[in-house]
Amino acid sequence: MVVLWLVLPAALGSFLLGVFVWAVFEHFLTTDVPSALPHRAKFRFLHCIFVYAVTLGNMFEKIGVCSLPRFLQFLQNSVRIKEDPALVVTNLHFGTILVRLFQPKAASPNPRCCCAGFCLADLYHSLCGSLAQETDSVLLAVGYRKLPDHHYYTLSCDCLNASIHFLKILETYGVDSSQVVLCGDSLGAGIVALISQTLVGRLDLPQIRAQNSRIPFLTQKLMITSVFKYLLIDFSWWDAIMSGAFIPPEVWKKYRKWLSPDNLPNRFKKTGCQPVFPAPFNEAADLENKHLLDVEYSPLLKDDEIIAQLPEAFLVSCENDILRDDALLYRKRLEDQGVPVTWYYVEDGFHGSLLFFDKKSFSFPCSLKIMNAVVCYIKSIL
C-alpha cells in the first residue's frame, strides 16, 4: 500500500511533465511569433502554459473527468484576488445573475460615471478594480452563466438583463445616468456591441454614453471550438462552416457589402491573397446551422438604421489578434453611419494582452498602453 502511494504521485508527475513537454513541442512546431513583438521569450513561455492548460482540459474531457470549459473555469477561478483598500467590492445577485460592484471608497461631491463590463469576474478582478479607481467610476462586472451548463441566448440574456436592471437603479449607487459606458474585452466586446444595439430606442432607460470594446491568448481552433460548443453545433460541420459553405448565395450577397475584405484599410490587406470564401453552397449545412447567421450573434450584421443610432465608440484592436479584422469591419460600419469612433491600434499587441497590465514580470508594453488608452478615453468624455 505504501508503494502504491509512492507510485501514484510519481506517475501523475510524469504524466503532467509529459503533457507539458508535448505542449512545448506543439508551440514551437505551430506558432510563429512575430518579430515585431517585444519580449518574445516571455510570450513563448505564456503561450506554452496556455497550450498546456488547453491540452490538459481536452484530455480530461476525453477521459470523462471534466469538460474543457469547466477545467478552464477552474483555472480562472484559481486566480488570486488582490484587494484594493481604496475600493469597496461587493458581490450581488440581480435575480439569478451574479454581478460584482466596484466603488471608490472616497466620497464624491457629484454622481459618478458608471462602467458596465461583461467579463469573467475573478480573472478580470484586478482590471475592473484599476479601471474603477483610475476613472473614479462605479463599475459593474457581470458574471454571466457559461459553458458547459449554459449555451446560446443565456450569455447575452444575462448581460442584457443585468444591464437593464442596473440602468433602472443607477441613483441607488450614486451614478450619473447620463454618464454610462459599456466596456468589454474579447467576447465581452461583442456583448457590448449587441447590448448597445438592443437598447437603441429604449426611451424608458438612460441612454448609453459610449461603448468601449477592446478586441485584443486566442487561437483560431480554440475560438471556433468554443463557438461550436456555445451554439450547440455538431463538429461534423467543421469544414462546411470554416469554408462558408453553409451560407446561402443570396445571404452572402446581402452581407458581402459589410464583410468583404475590400472594406479593410489597404495597410491590413495581404498582397497577392485572393479570397476564396465562401465555398460551394451546402444546403444540409445551412439547414442544420441557420442560427449561426442570426443577427443577435453578430453586431456586424445589424441593419444600418440600428447602427446609425448607436452611441460613440472606442475600439481597441491588436495586430496579432485573430479578431483584428472584425474590429476593423465594425469600425467601418459605424463610421459609414456617422457614429463617432475613436480607434486605438496596437501594433505590438495580441489577444488578451490587457490582462497582464499589472502582472509585473509577465506584463508587456502593449498591456499598459491599452490600459492607459482606455482610461484616457473614459476621462475625456466625462
Image: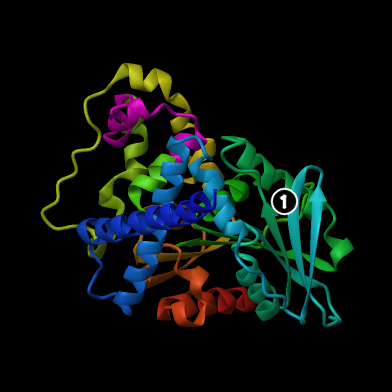
* Residue drawn at 35 percent across, 22 percent down: 285
Q: Where, quadrant-wise, is the C terminus in this rendering?
A: bottom right
Q: In this view of the protein, can residue 49 be seen by the observer?
A: yes
The secondary structure type at the circle numbered 1 is helix
Left or right placement of residue 157 versus residue 55 in this view: right
* Residue drawn at 82 percent across, 73 percent down: 111
The type of colouring in the image is rainbow
* Residue drawn at 35 percent across, 53 percent down: 219
Q: Position of residue 217 (x, y in %)?
A: 41, 60
Which of the 4 image quadrants contains residue 79?
bottom right
Q: Residues within 10 Å of mark 1 (few under 14, many from 20)?
A: many
Residue 116 to residue 291: above or below: below
Which of the 4 image quadrants contains residue 86?
bottom right
Q: Position of residue 105 (x, y in %)?
A: 82, 79
Looking at this view, is 189 or 40 the one in front? 40
- Tell me the residue that label 1 is attached to: 163
Residue 311 to residue 106: above or below: above
Q: Position of residue 165 (x, y in %)?
A: 79, 49
* Residue drawn at 61 percent across, 42 percent down: 155
Looking at this view, is 120 or 371 the one in front? 120
> Residue type at mark 1?
Ser
228 drawn magenta: yes
Left or right placement of residue 218 versus residue 29 in this view: right
54 drawn magenta: no
Which of the 4 image quadrants contains residue 150?
top right
Q: Position of residue 34 (x, y in %)?
A: 24, 69
Q: Give the residues in magenta.
A: 226-249
